[in-house]
Amino acid sequence: MRPIIVFSGPSGSGKNTIISELLRQRDDVAYSVSVTSRKPRPGEKNGQNYIFVTPKEFEQKINENEFLEWAKYLDNYYGTSRKEIEKIQRQNKFPLLDLDTQGALNLKRRGENVFTIFIKPPSLKILEQRLRKRGTDSEQEIQKRLKNASKEMAFADKYDFVVVNDSLDKTVQTIDDLLNQLASSDSRRNAENR
Ligand code: 5GP
């Protein structure tokens, strides 16, 4: 079975753009839409960026064991739906996940079939510039995200692969090559087990 590909990196690292590019370029990947209790940002669509629910609804889903993993990040809940991952893997595709460091390392620790990738911005200064340019977060939110970014970066060396995103094209190419390698070792394993 294709491993789950987990991406982490501070918001503004370019993680979302990289995932979008991979989805555009490859037909053997699918994005696993997470569930969150965060309010939608302008332009975000329910079912596309996230499945938006109330905190109470999220807690109910926790109790019903709907999540492969979940975490609280800056006071909001975020979780990966078990069903969504199973659906993607049944299609023999790589599920692509965007998780915070707790979620990513939690899956790894539990021995799930995951490959973890950390996307680093070239510097914190550039990260700050990108967050401001994006214009979707308030000043207070930007400060919170910057503070969190330094904390998250400290976990980078626990990931299977770390890439500094200084050129989008180069980063996407690197990850594309990596997925090709993972796909061929998966086919080899399947052939051996046949
Ligand atoms: P944002 O609010 O910027 O969309 O996401 C905040 C953080 O939550 C990001 O670091 C993102 O990777 C993480 N995140 C999104 N979905 C999930 C999820 O399903 N589980 C976990 N653990 N983190 C998530």
Image (cartoon, rainbow, N blue to C red):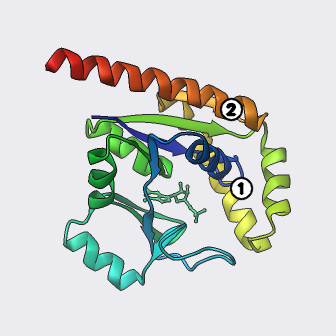
Q: Residue at x 49, y 24 (%)?
A: 180
Q: How dense is the environment of label 2, judged by Cα within 10 Å: few (below 14), some, or many (20 and up)?
A: some
Which label lies toward us, 2 or 1? 2
Name above or below for residue 175 compared with residue 52. above
Residue 111, quarter of picture: top left
Name above or below for residue 84 compared with residue 40. above
**Which residue in the protein does label 2 denote?**
171
Horizontal and vertical percent position of residue 63: 21, 73
State whether label 2 is within 8 Å of ligand 1.
no
**Which residue in the protein does label 1 denote?**
146
Horizontal and vertical percent position of residue 37: 46, 76
Pick the residue in front: 181 or 63. 181
Pick the residue in front: 83 or 74. 83
Name above or below for residue 34 compared with residue 153. below
Where does the N terminus fall, quadrant-wise? top left
185 left or right of 152 in image? left
Q: Residue at x 42, y 81 (%)?
A: 53
Q: Amino acid at mark 1?
A: Leu
* Mark 1: secondary structure: helix
* Mark 2: secondary structure: helix
Q: CA distance from mark 2 to mark 1?
A: 22 Å
Which of disc 1 and disc 2 is earlier in sequence?
1
Where does the C terminus fall, quadrant-wise? top left
Q: Amino acid at mark 2?
A: Thr
Pick the residue in front: 105 or 187. 187
